[in-house]
Amino acid sequence: MPPKHKTFSNSQIHKLLLEILTPEKKLYSGEVYGVLLPGIAGLFEILDKHAPLVSALGKGTLKILKAKNEVELYSIQSGFVEMLNNKATVLVEGAEAL
């Protein structure tokens, strides 16, 4: 017999908590599949259960992977990201939804 493939519903796929903060306000807070960030040495992606990290961010486009076919884009200035306990906190000087 061929092996059975397990299928997952959206509620079974693990997500991480993402918060995007500026000095003025909270731009985004919610569960996401991942986030693509403009690091100072290039782009990198954070997914569910990523190892803890702190990284500097450069000017560029931040891409939130909200669902399989749903993304949200922000243009950001310099900042930092911290990933700890399945929560990514992005602190940026300036950001604007695209």
Image (spheres, grey):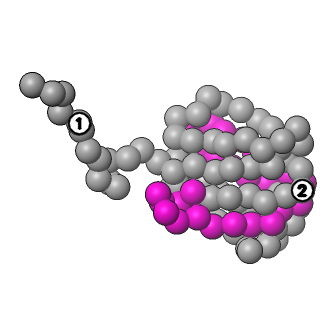
Q: Position of residue 55 (x, y in %)?
A: 80, 38
Q: In the figure, is residue 39 to the left or right of 62?
A: right
| For residue 82, side relative to residue 59 (left or right) | left
Mark sitting on residue 83? none
Q: Examine the structure image and report whether residue 93 is included in the region drawn in magenta.
A: no
Asked if the stretch drawn in magenta spans residue 66, the answer is yes
Magenta segment, which residues?
Answer: 65-91
Return the residue at label 1.
Answer: 5
Residue contact at pointers 1 and 2, CB within 8 angstroms = no
Q: Residue at the spot x=23%, y=36% of the render?
A: 5
Q: Which residue is mark 2?
A: 59
SS at badge 1: loop
Q: Secondary structure at mark 2?
A: loop
Of residues 98 and 93, the one nearer the viewer is 98
- Magenta stretch prevailing secondary structure: strand
- Where does the image place residue 39, in percent across and percent down from the top left? 83, 44
Q: Is residue 18 above or below residue 27?
A: above
Q: Which corner quadrant holds the N terminus?
A: top left
